[in-house]
């Protein structure tokens, strides 16, 4: 088992290569061509297999948050995709045979989203204020005229960014 503290991607990739070699020897009699394995720092879910480039991409964030056991589980899942591309019964039989312990990986990492800014628009005639989360174009004051009228076109007064 690998400790997550102070570990580099190269060390984890070496461990995954060793796991692939073990799986290939044990379950596939060495017939599988070794895929390129890499980490992505942009992914928020476990990983995927690309048949065309024969590579497995895993999430570095998922490794940091969920650890080695979750990462190797996802890796085995993706190795099973080398044989069966979709999630039919044969895929799951092979996946469980090679050691996948859970049907699906841990939930995706939650991104820390900033709240949307509050945009304050005003009517040039009545001075009425309207608060929105999204920008608006070519909108007019509904109090002054129920249909669009450029005379009452709303203009942006202020944008407030929540902390």
Image: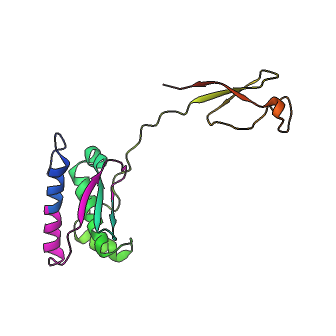
Q: Which residues are magenta?
A: 18-47
Q: Is residue 127 magenta?
A: no
Image quadrant where residue 152 sits = top right
Residue 35 x %, y %: 23, 67
Give the left or right position of residue 56, taking residue 135 as reference. Answer: left
Q: Residue at x 14, y 57 (%)?
A: 15
Q: Is residue 22 magenta?
A: yes
How many numbered tags mark residues here? Answer: 0
Residue 83 figure quarter = bottom left
Image x and y of residue 8, in percent: 17, 46
Residue 160 % position (x, y): 57, 24
Figure colour scheme: rainbow
Q: Position of residue 158 (x, y in %)?
A: 63, 23
Nearer to me, 159 or 68 = 159
**In the rendered view, does 161 fall on the left or right side of 107?**
right
The answer to whether 66 is drawn above or below residue 75 in the figure is above
Residue under the point 14% across and 78% down: 29
Q: Is residue 149 above or below residue 24?
A: above
Q: Residue at x 77, y 23 (%)?
A: 128
Q: Nearer the viewer, residue 56 or 5?
A: 56
The quarter holding residue 136 reads: top right
Left or right, 41 with reference to 135: left
Outermost residue toward the front? 150
84 versus 17 height, above or below:
below
């Amino acid at each position: 088992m690998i400790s997550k503290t102070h570990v580099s991607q190269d060390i984890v990739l070496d461990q995954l290569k060793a796991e692939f070699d073990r799986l290939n020897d044990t379950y596939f009699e060495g017939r599988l061509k070794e895929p390129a394995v890499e980490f992505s720092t942009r992914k928020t879910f476990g990983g995927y297999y690309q048949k065309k480039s024969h590579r497995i991409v895993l999430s570095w964030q998922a490794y940091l948050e969920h650890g080695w056991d979750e990462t190797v589980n996802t890796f085995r899942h993706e190795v099973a995709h080398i044989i069966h591309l979709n999630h039919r019964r044969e895929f799951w039989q092979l996946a469980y045979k090679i050691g996948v312990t859970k049907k699906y990986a841990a939930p995706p990492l939650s991104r820390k989203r900033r709240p949307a800014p509050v945009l304050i628009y005003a009517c040039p005639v009545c001075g009425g204020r309207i608060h929105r989360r999204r920008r608006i174009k070519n909108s007019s004051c509904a109090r002054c005229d129920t249909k669009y009228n450029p005379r009452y076109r709303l203009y942006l007064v202020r944008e407030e960014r929540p902390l």
